[in-house]
Amino acid sequence: MQKALRENKRILVEGANALMLDLDYGTYPFVTSSSTAIGGVCTGLAIPPKQIGRVIGVAKAYTTRVGAGPFPTEQVNVWIFFIIWKHPINTTGHGRRSGTLCKRLDTSMARLLDAAGGVGGLIWSS
């Protein structure tokens, strides 16, 4: 990594977990043991902040969560049955819970992503 930085090569970094699982920004204690926000690039890969160029956030248009833990925008109503049918039990055996009504944009999570990540652009997926 350091050699690539010295040679001014472009580096693409991809995070593996969502921001709500981040050790600092997530819903503790239901988090992972690492930083999933942009700060994780500095601490996990030893890339200095001044070397970070463009930051693009990627997020699902609707939020889901597997297993236990707080979920600020969770929908517990008739629409949850549609989402559970669409996203059946995963390999861990825990059901997938859904936030926002019927796949609508979760603006609360989008604001947190912008505040925590300082993103220069967003890509929404479904």
Image (cartoon, rainbow, N blue to C red):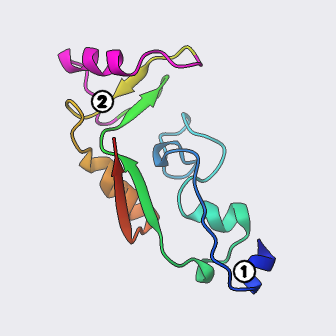
Q: Write down the region rendered in magenta.
A: 72-92
Circle 2 sits in a helix, a strand or a loop, which is it? Answer: loop
Give above or below for 43 relative to 85. Answer: below
The foreground one among 87 and 98 is 87
Relative image position of residue 107 (x, y in whole percent): 25, 50
Q: Label 2 crowding class (10 Å Cα cut-off): few <14, some 14-19, many 20+?
A: some
Relative image position of residue 51 (x, y in whole percent): 62, 81
The foreground one among 87 and 50 is 87
Relative image position of residue 65 (x, y in whole percent): 43, 30
As shown in the figure, which amino acid type bears the numbered disc 2? Glu
Judging by the rendered image, the residue that carries numbered circle 1 is 5
- The answer to whether the residue labelled 2 contacts the one labelled 1, judged by CB atoms less than 8 Å apart, is no
Relative image position of residue 123 (x, y in whole percent): 36, 57
Viewed as shown, does residue 89 lie left or right of 87? right
Q: Is residue 56 magenta?
A: no
| Residue in the image at 30% along x and 39% along y | 62
Judging by the rendered image, the residue that carries numbered circle 2 is 74
| Residue in the image at 58% along x and 56% along y | 14
How far apart in space, not on screen, are marks 2 and 1 (Cα)? 42 Å
Specify whether residue 70 is in view: no
Which badge, 2 or 1, is on the more N-terminal residue?
A: 1
| Residue in the image at 59% along x and 19% along y | 92
| Residue in the image at 62% along x and 60% along y | 40
Q: Please state the total of marks drawn on the protein image.
A: 2
Viewed as shown, does residue 107 lie left or right of 17? left
